[in-house]
Image (spheres, helix red, strand yellow):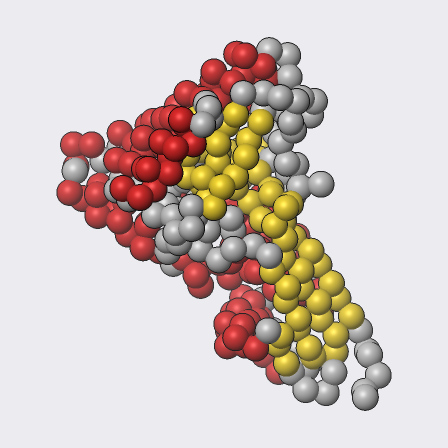
Amino acid sequence: MPAKVSEFGIELPAKWVLTGEHSVLRGKTAIAFPLSRYKLKLTYREQESFSITPNPFQSQIRKLMARALEYLKIPENAFPNGEVEIESGIPIGAGLGSSAALCAAIARLVLWKTKSDLSLWVSLATHLEDFFHGKSSGMDVNVIIHGAPVAFSVSRGIEKLDVSGAAPAFEWYDSGFRGSTRDCIERVHHWQKQNPHLKDSCDVRMHEAGLLATEGLKVFSLNPEVGELKLKAAMELAQECFEQWGLVTPELLTQKFDLLKQGALAVKLTGAGLGGFWVALWPSAGSRLDKGI
């Protein structure tokens, strides 16, 4: 067995979005959080041959690593052989950033092994995520890499949100359905072309939802009732956009109404749409926002 020359390991959280999906691609601000109950772990150790575990990731990982080296203008043969092992508990296609976490981990590995500038981590991970979505806003990789709640826009980047103290009672539920981010983006573009008179209406509402959500988060620890009312209004506005864009099936609507009947104050999809996870806001009972800790 060859001696271990070097080892690398990283663990990254999933993410969820409170408001701003899709509209973030057109310059609006999104509010997003890490979700540490779901994680991706990548380890690497140098060896004589190149291998990837689990094997189904082999082709995908090779392409991402080649894309990263090309971005850094480093010859592909400059990266030594080794064993890459990936353990991911982040559901794929569920709106929790599985591809962003993978891209962030691969980007960090390549930067570490090539001794490149670590300040390139976010930009490289975003470039890698373009491989999955066509054009990434960069929101997902920012939340996952920084591991903190953020307000994100393409033009301004991230602003970390202070959610210390008591926080709203959010909970997450798997719809059991899965949607492709690329397909959902195309569906929104198609809806905009078919409804030119309404083209910007959802983006305006998403912007309003982001403002309400930010206010709600800021005041919650001081006045939970006011905070919950603002967050409820924000989530309802954001969910209305999903439904108007055609990203909510009848089966998903049934799930939404079931959660509301059970007492949730507001319910919205998180992610691109057509499936994934619901996030529900429940009456406060002393729970805290997951801060990725």
Front-most of 139 and 278? 278
Q: Is residue 265 left or right of residue 3?
A: left
Q: Is residue 2 left or right of residue 188?
A: right
Quadrant in which the N terminus is drawn: bottom right
Q: Position of residue 11 (x, y in %)?
A: 69, 56
Percent position of residue 253, x then y: 32, 37
Residue at (16, 32) in percent of width and height: 197
Relative to 93, residue 61 above or below: below
The residue shown at (34%, 48%) is 274
Front-most of residues 260 and 27:
260
Let me know if residue 14 appears in the view: yes
Hey, which residue is sitting farthest right in the picture? 3
**Residue 40, picture quadrant:** bottom right
Residue closest to the eye, 212 or 134: 212
| Residue 142 placement (x, y as % from top left) | 57, 46
Quadrant holding the C terminus: top right
Please tell me whether residue 15 is drawn above or below residue 125 in the rendered image.
Answer: above
Direction from residue 210 to residue 48 in the image, left or right: right
Is residue 210 at all visible to an observer of this figure? Answer: no
Question: Which residue is rendered at x = 60% and y = 42% of the image?
Answer: 34
Number of numbered discs present? Answer: 0
Vertical order, 96 against 165 (above or below)? below
Residue 53 percent across, percent down from the top left: 62, 74
Q: Quadrant of residue 210?
A: top left
